[in-house]
Amino acid sequence: MNIIEEIIGDVLVEIINIDRATLNEADELKSALSIKMEEGYKNIIIDLSACDFIDSTFLGVLVNTLKKVAKVGGDLKLVGFRPAVRSMFELTRLFRVFDTYNELQAAIKSFQ
Amino acid sequence: MENSEIIDKILLVEDEANIVKLFEFNLKRAGYEVYSAMNGKEALEKVWEVKPELIISDIMMPEMDGFEFRREILKDEFLKTIPFVFLTAKGADEDILEGYDLDIQDYIIKTSSTKVVIAKVKAIVASYKKERDKVINEVQSAASNMIAAVVPTVAPYFEGYEIEHWHQTYQGIPGGDFIDYFELDEENMVVILGDVMGKKWGAYYFAIAYAGYIRSAVRFILQSSENFSPGEIIKKVNESVFRDERISEVYITLSVLLLKRDGTLKYSGAGDLPLFYKKEKVDFIKSDGILLGYFENSDYKDYELKLESGDEVYIMTDGIFEARNEEGVQLSVDGFTKIVENKNNENEMLDEIKKEFDVYTNKKYDDDISIIALKKT
């Protein structure tokens, strides 16, 4: 299982438990998020602490989800950047659109 | 089966260890790769990893039974396309009818002979693959007719410059990169490089749509202004994309260059990688525009360079920096800078870069790759 799901209060946490998050994980995350968003979850945290690399397909799912939850008053926050992932977010200027945290607890707290 | 390069995978969902052993033994002997799960819950965790050609599931299982597992599978657009077979102890009518209501392919009675089980499995997998291959062939054939819409075969001639590009598809399947050249008049040429977030077919179709949007935006600018600006072109594209529901879930990076015959180069970018330029040494410009389709009103700044004879400029998509060597180390901005720095200026611009890139990656690419090179003559 490459994605571990946890519910903390009304916050949905998806932990990406693989070093390279690409096409397969993008499909899996998209599917998991779509089910949970239909159930009404709109406050989402994606934990990328285990990822050394994410590709643009995976990044596309994050951006798309952020836009969707923002429309219904929710937010998607990111946790844990290893250097290559950080560099990808910096290169594509996506740091500007995501709220980012070093620790999961801080991200959860930010929703309370 | 033994001779085929790709082994078909079967996910077997069954809680009785003896049945698992028996089916595993027979299916493996018939040439299949078998993955097993003890119940529906465990199978849901494994199915994305395995992406099997067939799921064989028991009905009565602890935690999540076969019917509930099937209902979960049907919720997902991709997973529901995988053939699904129920395994049952006896041919109970109620089970069979409920199973067919859940859109399954067939039933296998646990006590069926090995020959019958293997024959059923082979027929279902073959039929699924035939249908899948047919769709892929049709799409591939349509794509080869349309490929020119996404990446031109050769770069155009524009007096005062040498222009080259290199485009490599991911695993032979078109992806999200697109390249376009647009000669505004004798003095001005627009060069466009885009990357739709995604891989393979989905991204490719959006790439065609984006190429269309960009052509429209360029025409609009051409008609409404005498002072051409790459940033204005990107702004117009972004507004169109944001408003269009059909592609509002797609995001794209874009680099736009405006070349003037006198050597003036204007550049603007949206979520794109840096523009590299080589004068005496290699340097780069990082645009600050956000990727297209995210904000309705975004501004895209123009950067200007004055190129002299021999100066070179490179723009590229992320497939270049993300390419890895055998040790898994990415080429990165620094690695690419070194390749450009060490390149012999007398040769064709992209020949050496391609060679160095192929040596670095051992020709194993993780994404589609596009790079455009220009030199002022």
Image: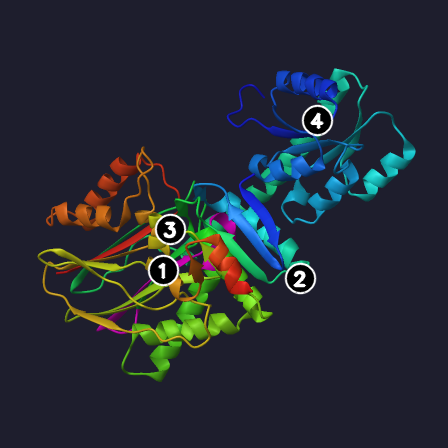
Q: Is residue B137 left or right of residue B218?
A: right
Q: Residues within 10 Å of mark 2 (few under 14, many from 20)?
A: few
Q: Position of residue A8 (x, y in %)?
A: 60, 54
**Which region shows up in magenta?**
B183-207
Q: Which quarter shows the C terminus of chain A?
A: bottom right
Disc 1 to disc 2, C-alpha distance:
30 Å
Q: Which quadrant would residue B217 be assigned to in this image?
A: bottom left
Q: Secondary structure at mark 4?
A: helix
Q: Which quadrant would residue B192 be assigned to in this image?
A: bottom left
Disc 3 to disc 4, C-alpha distance:
43 Å
- Residue denoted by label 2: A40
Rendered view: B269 above or below B6: below
- Residue denoted by label 3: A85
- Residue denoted by label 4: B121
**Mark 1 vs mark 3: same chain?**
yes
Q: Position of residue A19 (x, y in %)?
A: 43, 41
- Residue denoted by label 1: A92
Q: Circle 1 marks a residue in which chain?
A: A
Q: Secondary structure at mark 3?
A: helix
Kindly report which numbered mark, 1 or 3, lies closer to the viewer in this rendering: 3
Q: Secondary structure at mark 1?
A: loop
Q: Position of residue B36 (x, y in %)?
A: 65, 27
N-term-proximal mark, 2 vs 3? 2
Disc 1 to disc 3, C-alpha distance:
11 Å
**Mark 2 vs mark 3: same chain?**
yes
**Residue B76 circle label:** none
